[in-house]
Amino acid sequence: MNSQQVLQQVAALLPLVAVFVFFYVVSIRPQQMQQRKHREMLGRLKKGDRVLTRGGLYGVILDVRDNDVTLELAQNVRVRADRTAVQSLVRRGSGAGS
């Protein structure tokens, strides 16, 4: 094969590579960063944090164990949930939950 044929083959692959790079930058990479932030947030959970679960329940963390947390949803209403059930931390003056 001469150099012109090699150049043509490389040029034919260039659009495929460009599409892959585009999807990586636009879709895959931001999702990976979001997952990493969520894992870090789960690792920093501590007693007293106000959280929102994936099921839409607001609660306050009473206890954190290896893979689960004990939440108080209302006065004297406590549930134990897997740590990954926590979707996000809730700021104290947000008005959601009480």
Image: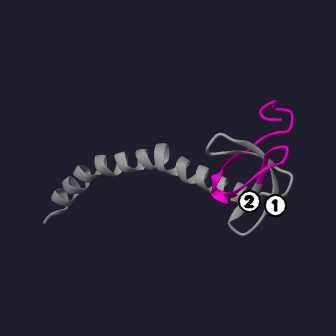
Name the kind of residue labelled 1 in the image: Asp
Q: Which one is in front, 67 or 30?
A: 67
Q: Which residue is mark 2?
A: 69
Cα distance in 3D space between marks 2 and 1: 6 Å
Furthest toward the left, the residue is: 1
Q: Which one is in front, 43 or 49?
A: 49
Furthest toward the bottom, the residue is: 66
Task: Locate residue 74 relative to residue 29 in the image: left or right.
Answer: right
- Residue drawn at (72%, 55%), measured in percent from left and top? 41
Q: Which one is in front, 60 or 73?
A: 73
Q: Which residue is mark 1?
A: 63
Describe the colour scheme in one phrase.
Answer: one colour
Q: Residues within 10 Å of mark 1 (few under 14, many from 20)?
A: some
Q: Earlier in the sequence, mark 2 or mark 1?
A: 1
Tags 2 and 1 in contact by the CB under 8 Å rule?
A: yes
Residue 73 at x, y = what percent? 77, 44
Highlighted magenta segment, given as a residue range: 71-98
- Residue drawn at (26%, 53%), measured in percent from left and top? 13
Q: Which of the image's four quarters has the N terminus?
A: bottom left
